[in-house]
Image (spheres, helix red, strand yellow):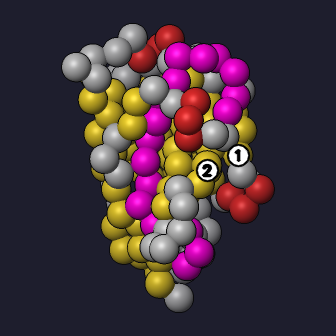
Amino acid sequence: QVQLVESGGGRVQAGESLRLSCAASGLAFSSYAMAWFRQAPGKEREFVAHITWVGVSTYYTDSVKGRFTISRDNARKALYLQMNSLKPEDTGVYYCAAHRDPSVSDSQGAYDYWGQGTQVTVSS
């Protein structure tokens, strides 16, 4: 059974940092590309960042470029999202997702497995 479990969310002030983690089990982690998505209150879930199988290539939505960094540790079966200079508009539930296709995708439908999410709240 595949499980993706996010952690590290919380409530912070604007300008502060958080590091999210996603622990994977039940899948050959190094064979999956991984991504982070987020969903703000009243809005649809949106793509945040993507990382390839071995972490060589990363891809970000424009609003987080230069502030967020996605990384992975295949030995630990873990995915991370370092979030710096947080803004109130970064508030939402953050989800990690896995897909077998090695190509970059910002579409939710491309992903095979999802975590339950972790809440990030940024106050001004």
x and y percent of residue 118 in the render? 34, 56
Callout 1 touching callout 2 (CB < 8 Å): yes
Q: Which residue is mark 2?
A: 48
- Amino acid type at circle 1 is Tyr
Q: Quadrant of the N terminus?
A: top left
Determine the residue positioned at 39% across, 11% down: 28
Determine the residue positioned at 36% across, 74% down: 11
24 drawn magenta: no
Viewer can see residue 13? yes
Residue furthest out toward the front: 109
Q: Which residues are magenta?
A: 88-105
x and y percent of residue 22 in the render? 37, 38
1 or 2: tag closer to the N-terminus: 2
Residue furthest out toward the right: 62
Q: Is residue 15 rendered to the left or right of residue 39?
A: right
Q: Is residue 24 rendered to the left or right of residue 63?
A: left
Q: Looking at the picture, tell me which residue is in the foreground, 77 or 33.
A: 33
Viewer can see residue 75? no
Q: Looking at the picture, tell me which residue is in the foreground, 79 or 31.
A: 31
Q: How many marks?
A: 2
Determine the residue positioned at 52% across, 24% down: 99
Determine the residue positioned at 33% across, 27% down: 24
Q: Secondary structure at mark 1?
A: strand
Q: Is residue 6 rendered to the left or right of residue 20?
A: left
- Amino acid type at circle 2 is Val
Q: Is residue 62 above or below residue 24?
A: below
Q: Which mark is residue 60?
A: 1
